[in-house]
Amino acid sequence: MPVSGVPLRPLIAATAAYSAPALIVLSAFAVYEAISIWHGAAIWAVLTATTFLVLRRQHAALVAMRRYVERSADRWSQAAETERPAGFGDQVLSDLAAAVDRLVRQTRAETSRATTLIQAREMVIDAVAEPLLVLARGGHVSGANRAAHRLLGISVVGRDLSEVLRHPQVLEAANEVMTGGPPASVEVTLALPTERVFAVRIDPLPAIAADGAAAVLMLSDLTGLKRAERMRADFIANVSHELRTPLASIVGFIETLLGPARDDTAARGRFLEIMNQQAQRMARLVADLLSLSRIEQNEHLPPTGRIDLGQILGTVKATLDVVAQNKAMTIVLDVAPDLPPVPGEADELQQVFQNLVDNAIKYGRTGTSVTITARLAQEWHPSMPRTQGASTGKSQPRALSVAVADRGAGIARQHLPRLTERFYRIDVARSREAGGTGLGLAIVKHILNRHRGALAIDSAEGQGSTFTVYLPEYPG
Ligand SMILES: Nc1ncnc2c1ncn2[C@@H]1O[C@H](COP(=O)(O)OP(=O)(O)O)[C@@H](O)[C@H]1O
Ligand SMILES: [Mg+2]
């Protein structure tokens, strides 16, 4: 049997050691002439040869066993079992091989459990919506969740924090936390690539982790919050300003009537007329503000009624016909027959169309007409939420469209996206003169939000504007 890789020298040494006692005994027999020297030499040669062969076989088995263990160690991260060497008949050695196999299997199971745990932990960190960085003791980033990669780029791990978040306050806070300080929180503006405001919080880990992680840095985006705060402040400033102007005028006239014009009856009539107008303007503003706040409060509640739009539009036309006539204008109502009902609140939808038709009269040209066209919409407006049919796989729910078109001066393109903001007016003086509050289209937008509808504005300067309302059909 060819035995490869068995080193010869230890084999010879072992054979010599095993056969030495026999050599001594045989030599003694020969000396005392119990056996002849030739017999002794022959017995010793046979013994030595047998010992050599037995030892060579055992050495070969040990060498094969060593290779087997080495291969198992090298391969235990792989799924395939290490193939056992052939001719492994010896019971002790085959038990040994089985023990090695068990060891390999257990280590493999432990490794895979550890990997699963690490993956689970990474999944949890990835699921955190806020960008999160793990900071290692040296100050470099040793881990990042998906949100952090999205915000800061994919190559943040391994880089120094100063390269990832170039902000002195953040670096200073991180430094303090890493040198044993308490958790730190700073608010910073980062250009990523647009400017955004973040609250950066750095928390030390209770102990340095095995991978060197020492602290966790979390970024919370405050941009929306800041914007809302600014909007609230702007809104209060706007309301105060809108109320102060008529109020100042009323106070001024009261003082005049109490003072210099006390006995001027002609002036009194004129002044009272102006005061009345200003008071009504304030009342309109307060009514619109209350209406807006009520609508906003209910915006999350779906409307409960089942509305016939033709009827609502008829009422709106009847209410505003007189206003149109004052400007020598006419309202033309064109409602397609057999329009399906829409889910809605009657008084809110009436408010929508009243505002749009009122604007069309206010900003339309004297002597022209305002047309209201109600149809089954050809297309679902892109900004309308598609909750009902699209998800259930049924045919898509239809929408109704109501277009209010005027032949006024039209609206320049840059104003279109901002028209539904509160108090946004293209020409403040003109709006005020016409009794506007600047809240009409904001009210329209919020009512349509509640109705899961949409507003589209098309305008050509010098030719007029069309405000189209889309509302989903009543389901079922
Ligand atoms: N049909 C229209 N044609 C031209 N401009 C319009 C029209 N409707 C609205 N606007 C512009 O949008 C602004 C906001 O409208 P709105 O919110 O109804 O406020 P208000 O009518 O009280 O001024 C108006 O001031 C006006 O500048
Ligand atoms: Mg208006």
Image (tube, grey):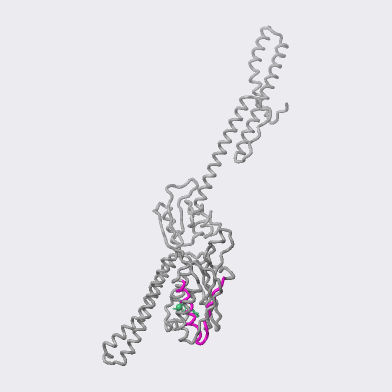
Q: Which residues are magenta?
A: 349-376
Give 12 or 326, whichever is nearer the viewer.
Answer: 326
In the image, what residue occupies the spot 53% across and 55% down?
146
Question: In the image, is residue 312 part of the stretch drawn in magenta?
Answer: no
Write down which quadrant ligand 2 falls in. Answer: bottom left
Give 404 or 311, whichever is nearer the viewer.
Answer: 311
Residue 460 position, x and y percent, is 56, 80
Image quarter where the N terminus lies is top right
Residue 451 position, x and y percent, is 48, 67
Vertical position of residue 154 compared to residue 83: above or below: below
Q: Quadrant of residue 89?
A: top right
Residue 140 position, x and y percent, is 50, 54
In the image, what residue occupies the spot 58% across and 63% down?
396
Give 285 or 65, whichever is nearer the viewer.
Answer: 285
In the image, what residue occupies the spot 68% across and 31% down?
5
- Left/right of residue 231 with respect to residue 56 in the rendered view: left
Vertical position of residue 315 compared to residue 342: above or below: below
Q: Quadrant of residue 264?
A: bottom left
Residue 233 position, x and y percent, is 39, 71
Vertical position of residue 19 compared to residue 178: above or below: above
Q: Quadrant of residue 271?
A: bottom left
Give 88 or 462, whichever is nearer the viewer.
Answer: 462
- Left/right of residue 108 with respect to residue 170 in the rendered view: right
